[in-house]
Structures are given as C-alpha cells and as structure tokens.
Image: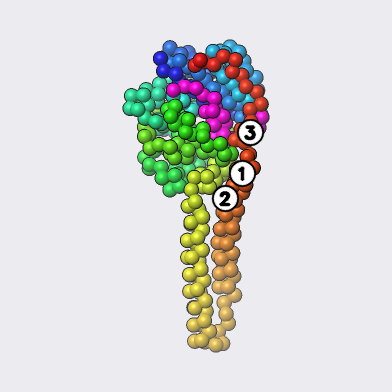
Amino acid sequence: MKNISIVIPVYNSENSIGGLCEQLIKSLSILYNLEIVLVNDRSKDNSDAVCVALFEKYPDRICFYSLAKNVGEHNAVMAGLNHATGDYVVIMDDDFQNPASEVPLLVEEAIRKGCDVVYSQYEEKKHSLFRNLGSSFNDAVANVMLKKPKHLYLSSFKVMSRFVVDQVIRYDLPFSYIDGLILRVTDNIGVVNVHHEERADGKSGYTLKKLVSLWLNMFTSFSILPLRVAIILGFIFSFLGLVLGIQTLIERIMNPNLPLGWSQLIVAVSIFAGVQLVAIGMTGEYVGRIFLSQSKKPQFTIRTAYEKKKALE
C-alpha cells in the first residue's frame, strides 16, 4: 500500500477536527498506509486538548504538533510538511468542507497520471461571499505574479508528491505561500473536480488582515513585478508632469493676465506625492522582509510534539 500523509492545520476547530480524523482513519486506512499530521496554530479554543486525545487514541496514525505562536495557515502547513513522511502528502482544511471520501480521488489521479501536484476544483464553492471575492482577487493576482495557468484554481485541498514536498520544505524563510512555492518547482499539475460542503462549525479564520498579509506574501516573496510597476508609474507621471508644465507655460505666454490654476497645482502635487509614497512603501516592504529573513525570524516554533509512534515507520 502507498504511504499517504494528510497534513491538517488546526485553528479553533475543537468541534470538527475529531470527527474529521475519525472519518479519515475509517475510510482511508484500508486503502493506504495512513499518517495524519495535525498542527495546532495556537487555537483560542480547546483544539489542543482534542488533538492530544486523538493522538492518544491513534498513536500509530496521528502525529500532533502544537505551535507556540499563531503563524498563519501557510506556515502551519509548512510545519506539517516538515514532519510528513508519506510518498504523497495531502493538505486539507479542518472544517469538513472537503469530505474524507474525496481524498482518494486526488491521490489516485496523482498516482495514475504521475502528477507532481493535483489540485481540487469545486463545482460549487460554499464559502462566504467575502471569502469568494478574496479568492477571485487572489486568483487574478496569481495569474500575473506567479504565471499561474488561468484554468487552475489554487485550492487549499491538494495532494503533493514526495519530490515536491522535499523541494517546498527547502524554503525556510518566514513568508511562506505554499502555492507559490509549488509553482516554482513544477508545472506537472493535475486537477480533479470534487464536492465542496458547507462549513460544519464556526466561521472561517481568514480575516481581511490575514488575506492582505497573504497577498503581500505573493506580491513580495515571489516576484519583483511591483517594483517594476512602481518604476513604470514613475515614468508615466513624470511625463504627465512635463505635459502639465508645458501647458502652464503656454497658457502664461498666450495670456499673461491669466491666473495660474490653484486646483491644477494641488492635483499635480497630490498625484506625484501619492506615486512617491507608493514606490517608497513598496520598496520599504521588500527591505523589511529582507531584514526579517536575514534576522532568521522562524516560520514556526513547535512548543510540544506528539509523535510517540510514527504511522509510516
């Protein structure tokens, strides 16, 4: 049987993670040599105790890592990938929106076609309107920044080969974006249509702040395109400033008594000051990330590890 690891980042899911793990073990243990890697991203509820109980119940199937600080979904996934041992590694959420029965569809597609990565694609997404709008924006940005194939939806529910996992975990800087790292490594990517269920409990942990942070990771960690855009905007608005200057000079020559436009001056200053602030801010973001990377800010810090008996040993 194939060795399969399932990495699940856990955040405020005390009411769902137990049932999900039970379903995964019941439906997949007969098909694969199964390992479930749970990573608690400093949940505010009782998720930690639930995960410990799961480990104690299934020490041959479940490994659990409790992080000392909330680091976000992608860094929590990186913690799981660094400890997953399967030939194929599935990443899925903790909220039951991806049924356990769908996992074999992704794994078998990867095995049958020899894909490095297989993403899920939803016939109908059951996320909130806010989350769907964020995903659409993220998808459009990824097309430009990451050179993502336009038909590919970057779902969090996917399976990766051992080769891709080994390449992804070589990235040890603090600004992880899993899909960006995958697209750096390979273009041998498959897609499988799956069902998407309503969230079983609670609400999504993705706030506007977290989505902006994710987009900044994509902007600044995988491309220098924003800096190039700032340069182009600088040239464009410099040209517009030259045009305005010439226009003002001509008006002054043609009609010496014509008062110079106060509103025109304010608009010009506002535009140029705005462009300068954007360019400086973007440059500062890059410099700040370089500083944090050089200062060895960790991706994650594991407070407690429960791995008494690895599933795939």
Inspect the image, locate mark 1, and give the three-letter code of the amino acid beneath it.
Gln
Query: Separation of disc 1 and disc 2 at Cα?
Result: 12 Å
Other residues around mark 3 within 10 Å, as few (<14) / some (14–19) / many (≥20): some
Q: Earlier in the sequence, mark 1 or mark 2?
A: 2
- Where does residue 142 sit, x and y in percent of width and height? 45, 44
Residue under the point 61% across and 19% down: 306
Label 1 SS? helix
Label 3 SS? loop
Other residues around mark 1 within 10 Å, as few (<14) / some (14–19) / many (≥20): few
Q: Quadrant of the N terminus?
A: top left
Inspect the image, locate mark 3, and give the three-letter code of the amino acid beneath it.
Asn
> Which label belongs to residue 184?
none
Please give the residue where the numbered disc 1 appears in the rendered image: 294
Q: Is residue 312 magenta?
A: no
Please give the residue where the numbered disc 2 appears in the rendered image: 286
Q: Are marks 2 and 3 in contact (CB under 8 Å)?
A: no
Placement of 237 over or under 256, stated as above or below = above
Residue under the point 56% across and 36% down: 172
Magenta segment: 67-87
